[in-house]
Image (tube, coloured by chain):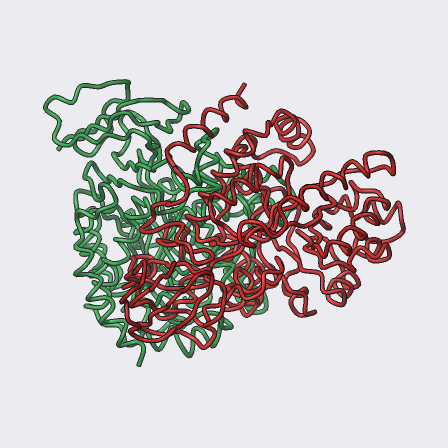
Chain colours: A green, B red
Amino acid sequence: MSILIQNASALSPQGLLQRTSIAIEGARITRIAPALPARGVDTVIDAQGQLALPGLVNAHTHLAMVLLRGYADDMALQPWLQEKIWPAEAKLTAEQVYWASLWGCAELIKGGVTAFCDMYFFMDEVAKAVEQAGLRALLSYGMIAPKPDDKVEREVGVAEAFAERWHGRAQGRIQVALAPHAQYTCCDRLWERTLEVARARKLRVNTHLCETRKEVEFCRKEHGKSPVAYLNQLGAFEAPTVAAHCVHVDGEDIDILASKGVFVSHNPGSNLKLGSGVAPLPKLLHAGVTVALGTDGAASNNNLNLFEEMQLAALLHKGIGQDPLAVPAPQAFELATRNGYLALGMEGGGALAEGALADVILVESRQVHLEPLYCPLSALVYSAQAADVTTTIVDGQVLMKERQLLTINEAHVREKVNEMANFHRR
Amino acid sequence: MSILIQNASALSPQGLLQRTSIAIEGARITRIAPALPARGVDTVIDAQGQLALPGLVNAHTHLAMVLLRGYADDMALQPWLQEKIWPAEAKLTAEQVYWASLWGCAELIKGGVTAFCDMYFFMDEVAKAVEQAGLRALLSYGMIAPKPDDKVEREVGVAEAFAERWHGRAQGRIQVALAPHAQYTCCDRLWERTLEVARARKLRVNTHLCETRKEVEFCRKEHGKSPVAYLNQLGAFEAPTVAAHCVHVDGEDIDILASKGVFVSHNPGSNLKLGSGVAPLPKLLHAGVTVALGTDGAASNNNLNLFEEMQLAALLHKGIGQDPLAVPAPQAFELATRNGYLALGMEGGGALAEGALADVILVESRQVHLEPLYCPLSALVYSAQAADVTTTIVDGQVLMKERQLLTINEAHVREKVNEMANFHRR
């Protein structure tokens, strides 16, 4: 399979390249140059009036929760979880997770997301959906075992078997991570076993960390340490780790995250909506932490729109810190692209460059809300919408063209998902 | 002119009406009921799979600044103003303001905004654009006169002459307000004259208030009072007033705003981007202040997207106050609709009801990022994009249908605006 994108304005690491061509062979970008020949190319895409950029990365989500989008909003965290989300999740079937995951993939593709990191259950179903949709993903089964009982081995067993079946599958598009759900839901023994398996199988770790003030206070009371310090003492960060949230971290925590090379997924939309707070993004970045962006599940967002998260990341910290220089547009863009690929451990992603992964999106820039187009990066971060994405290419395969999904039957999945959502209304 | 919208899901004050018809005669909604007859109706719109709702209101903008969208970003406030925005504005011509205003109208219509409040200069050009575009607007010439010299009467003269020419024009769609730019840019004499003219002509007042910490500190030092208290003492709030921003207001200020019935335009996107801070929206609402939403100019936003402001208003205060119950979706929706019309003094707007102004928009809800659609209000506030708007009707005239502008030649205005934007690149 070869693809040639013509007449694009390309956001490359060298800056904006006007009227350029991007040649893709197999899974890689092979050439970026003006007016490359179209002869013999399988698919030619005219990108006149469009910006070409690396695909966006959703570094933290629970994909199948699109089924619970808008199911329960504007509630306090505990009743939201205990009365709404957990009972609904307890009823979810494997089939529902499959169709919901496909629906989530459809939303990611439409919004220009090319790679994502997921933590949920019935993960084989999620993996099947990802394989079919053509996306790139780091998938993980969320392990929960608060006590050092039999459940520890059962959970590790499920996670390890999933890794065995799926790690490296779909031409390498699917990678598997191990996911102890969080410090407060997993006993020391589970963390230790996670590390053993992660080392043996060379897997990443994906977890929730310091999302709420309460969990931090609880850990300090219990262990006299913050969750970050406590997990660090357990050696948890010896495996490459993606830590979601990190809202309530102090200077000492940030130093640990930086020195251990922990990747942080900043999820500003979800953290705001659930009333968790605002992560100290400028401090994390200043300390050298590699921060990516995520949406969290659609139940707490309520979408999988990385443009919104990029905009929130750029705006929020300016306002709260009363510093208009915080998180400028190029940095917000880097969080959503390059840093996302780094967090997911997918080398060669996140940049439009020769030899890079062929994960490319096109954004229609000839639009009323984006013109005049003085600065494409500003337009993307401060003004673009997910609906501006026209084309999504992952691993050298076109997943969406002219806003039409090519790997997912949208009408059919819609029907399935809406039918299943009716179940939850009862 | 009569319009019949069929098969809509309508967000009425009585809740969601499924499969309903909305009949419009002239400038008013005349009937809302299932299956109204289409015979003899001029325009029939099938709204299957769409939500019908009152149009959104942008309660604070500087429309023609779309010409400076992305012209200067990620700068500190003073160099941004002094080195970039003010020099660019000093070069603006009446013709540029006209075309830029049309472009701004195009963006408002595309994003489902039916009414807005503007403050700028060359206001006749803005008014001409609004008249042509078919929008509803409260327009004001921004008066600046820091000293009680001749400029006071010159500024009042410009504003009064504009009111004389345009107040009540375009079948009443255009209203004029008087706009002393801000407390710190207008001397007492200008405020007094404003009040005289506002009373004599029964006009509203539109101003900037407490946007930055600095202006509040300056006023306290100069006058021993906050800008709100100082203006109140001058009697400035005796005319109905729209005050933009109100970021740095304390409890006493909020009491004054509430007791004087001052309408506040909350502009979260711009306040964040410029590093001004976050207005205490929950406190303002708790005190009974009628708060609407605005984008501010596109130079500091960078768009005129009320969906983004609605989402920010709903999310921001949950996160900052660590209170997931702050500003629930129905309240954010009310700020963007009903409160907007109240702020602009346009009676009968902001609700889908019989007898109300025929300012109606349709939002495509059969979309991947909005389904399953458990709760339309949640979907609109937490997940919808401006691009989801398909149809915009103002004053009983269809301004956009199937995402195509009907009163503005988009291609022609684009050409003009991009040509003019090149001027500013130099």
Return the residue found at the far bottom. A426
Compared across the picture, whether B196 is left or right of B85 comes to right
Q: Where is residue A215 in the image (x, y as percent from the top left)?
A: 52, 66
Residue at (18, 39) in percent of width and height: A397
Q: Nearer the viewer, residue B334 or A243?
A: B334
- Answer above or below: position of B246 versus A314: below
Compared across the picture, whether B275 is left or right of B154 comes to left
Q: Position of residue B293 (x, y in %)?
A: 57, 56
Q: Which of A407 and B86 is in front in this view?
A: B86
Residue at (73, 40) in percent of width and height: B143
Compared across the picture, whether B213 is left or right of A90 comes to right
Residue at (35, 78) in percent of width and height: A87
- Answer above or below: position of A139 versus A14: below
Quarter occupied by the C terminus of chain B: top right
Q: How many marks?
A: 0
Quarter occupied by the N terminus of chain B: bottom left
Residue at (38, 43) in percent of width and height: A340
Q: Which of A340 and A147 is in front in this view?
A: A340
Q: Residue A26 occupies which quadrant of the picture?
A: top left
Q: Position of residue B34 (x, y in %)?
A: 31, 75
Compared across the picture, whether A102 is left or right of A39 comes to right
Q: Position of residue A17 (x, y in %)?
A: 36, 22
Return the residue found at the far left. A40
**Visible residue check, residue A225:** no
Q: Nearer the viewer, residue B252 or A321?
A: B252
Q: Residue A398 occupies which quadrant of the picture?
A: top left
